[in-house]
Amino acid sequence: QVQLVESGGGLVQAGDSLRLSCAASGRTFNSYGMGWFRQAPGKEREFVAAFRWSGTPVYADSVKGRFTITRDNAKNTVYLQMNSLKPEDTAVYYCAVRQLIILPYDDPSKYDYWGQGTQVTVSS
């Protein structure tokens, strides 16, 4: 089992920044399998950012150029730096792990472990 704990969410104004953290513990896994998703009220969970099997970071078009995913292997932690936040970024943000890193990084059904989520609210 892998345990994931997100932190760093909050209420901010449009244009502000936040950094989300996701600390992992438990069984060993490849950190390239980590990703971030979000879910707004009444909407399906959607892909935000992740790593390809090669380790290359990838992003949803809606956040490209504003969000950055990084990882610290020594701390078993992945981060999501969110800049220039918009009201439409408001959602619960989840980090997740897919054990088979060759699986599609943007498909939530391919992820095996999920955190409890952290709320991000961006006011206009």
Image (spheres, grey):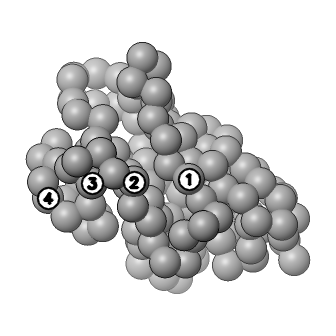
Q: For mark 2, give the secondary structure.
A: strand
Which of marks 2 and 3 precedes in the sequence?
A: 3
> Which residue, given by chain and number where applicable, does mark 3 sit on?
52
Gap between marks 4 and 1, in whole Å?
A: 21 Å
Q: In which quarter of the image is the C terminus?
A: bottom right
Dot 1 or dot 3: first in sequence order is: 3
| First in residue order: circle 4 vs circle 1 | 1
Residue under circle 4? 103
Dot placed on the residue nearer the N-terminal end, 1 or 2: 2
| Picture residue at 46% right of the left edge, 19% below the top | 75
- Residue, disc 1: 68
Mark 1 element type:
strand
| Mark 2 crowd level (few <14, some 14–19, many ≥20, 10 Å Cα) | some
Q: In this view, does 12 lie to the left or right of 24?
A: right
For disc 3, the neighbor class at 10 Å (few under 14, some 14 to 19, many from 20) is some
Q: Do the residues labelled 3 and 2 touch (CB within 8 Å)?
A: yes
Q: Mark 2 points at which residue?
A: 57
Ranked by sequence position, the earlier of labels 4 and 2 is: 2
How far apart marks 4 and 3 lie (CA) works out to 9 Å
Query: What is the spatial separation of the Cα atoms under label 3 and label 2, in whole angstroms?
Result: 6 Å
Left or right, 39 with reference to 58: right
The 10 Å Cα crowd at callout 1, few under 14, some 14 to 19, many 20 or more, is some
Q: Quadrant of residue 19?
A: top right
Question: Can you tell which of label 4 and label 2 is closer to the viewer?
Answer: 2
Question: Amino acid under label 4?
Answer: Leu
> At which x and y percent is residue 79?
54, 41
Q: Are marks 1 and 2 in contact (CB under 8 Å)?
A: yes
Is label 3 in a helix, a strand or a loop? loop
What residue lies at 52% left-to-right and 82% top-to-bottom?
Answer: 42
